[in-house]
Image (spheres, grey):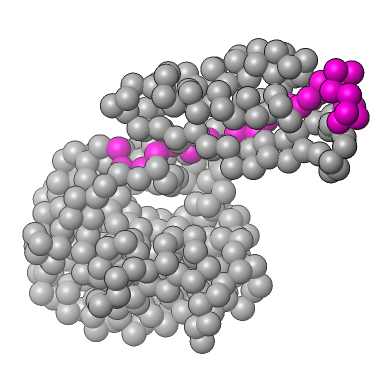
Amino acid sequence: MNKEYILNKSKELLPVTIKNRRHIHSNPELSFQEFQTAEYIRSILNQHNIYNYPLAETGTVAIIGKGDSCVALRADIDALPIFEETNLEFASRTDGIMHACGHDMHTSMLLTAAIILKENESNLNGCVKLIFQPAEEKIPGGAKLMIEQGVLENPRPLAIFGQHIYPQEQSGTVSTNSGPVLASADELYFTIKGKGSHAAQPHVGSDAILAASNLIIYYQSIISKFKNPLESGVLSVTSIHGGSATNIFPDEVKMMGTLRAYSNDWRFRVHDILRKNSKQIAELYGCTCEVEILEGYPPVVNDNSTTQFARTISEELFGKENTLEFEPKMWAEDFAYFAKEIPACFWLTGVRPAGVQELPPLHNSRLSPDENAMANGVAMLVYSAYKFLESK
């Protein structure tokens, strides 16, 4: 397979990719509940005589080709708890659930890549393992579960490639870089307990709201005073609940937030700081503070040589001018678990239509990416897998 064939074939099958995408988009399912989506994926694979088997219940693994050399391609399949507001004719049929992160496109692109690879199976210098992964949007994530159940064994891939749609960049572009590209993501939960009293008599109680306010301010100093200024990190309190009247101090205040980092060393140091210092600060106000940290995904770190390989593939397919350096984001992705196990590259495929200056971002109820861009994503998946095996 040469690049001209792959580009032409990806465009030829674009109507198929769009059809699959619209079906999946209309029938979104939340993390670990993707039963109909999994059934649909397996039906397409079966139609094309592609060997596949279930894993992690709603996950699916397919294998094309044979031999000791193996490369993996991954797509995620779950949707988000968002009410869709696109007014598209194929909009979500399920109130409150939407493919607002592009997983419908990721899955459809991998399905079409599977079709092309199957048609050219005899030309593969090894095998391609296709991973349709559930529950990217919910900790602990489907990637971790699939790895625990052996997705990277029998055969073990030499490398893995994954992609994500990118509304910030125009269709026809591919963005990536080596090293950290996405952050770790930990969920933070705080419960501040005081002593409720009349608001006109603060001295007979313990003000949990005042304690919570000072904790929020202190948490921002962790970013500025405990982190190397040259490193990236975010600690955000995103929710605070306490009290129900103007003349009552509540007994309890609850807060939630997120911690993002590229450095695991600094990340886990912050965990210790939060647990220890939150209690001490709360005590200054006669309160207690319980800290619960739900450890989320690690940072996504792209392997240098694998990423350079993917950049070369993009340059061959779309030109150097459309192969962009990705500015790392504090988003999180459980593709990180795959990247911890084997050499990996995670790239972003531009989906902003030509002539459109700004597209609603990921996780937005009005996100409507350019479906034509999926041909580019298909070509990247197919050519990356084919050329990687050819080099072995």
Q: Is residue 151 left or right of residue 314?
A: right
Location of residue 266 (image quadrant) = top left
Q: Position of residue 365 (x, y in %)?
A: 53, 68
329, above or below 103, in the image: above
Is residue 28 in sight in this rendering?
A: no
Along the horizontal axis of the image, is 29 left or right of 183? right
39 vs 306: above or below: below
Q: Number of labelled discs?
A: 0
Q: Is residue 247 visible?
A: yes
- Taking depth in this image into account, of 226 and 99 the one nearest to the observer is 226
Q: Residue sitting at 24 percent across and 84 percent down? A: 12
Please name whichever residue, 298 or 383, is drawn nearer the observer in this view of the structure.
298
Give the residues in magenta.
180-208
Does residue 155 appear left or right of residue 2 in this picture? right
Q: Residue at x 80, y 31 (%)?
A: 252
Q: Is residue 30 left or right of residue 320?
A: right
Report which quarter residue 337 is drawn in.
top left
Towards the viewer: 204 or 140 = 204
> Where is 164 relative to 120, above or below?
above
Residue 292, position as x, y percentages in the image: 65, 28
Quadrant placement of the N terminus: bottom left
Magenta segment: does it hold 183?
A: yes
Asked whether 205 falls inside the magenta stretch, the response is: yes
> Residue 207 placed where, x, y %?
78, 25
Q: Residue 103: x and y, percent?
A: 45, 63
- Which residue is located at x 43 percent, y 45 percent? 332
Residue at the image position 60 percent from the left and 15 percent from the top: 277
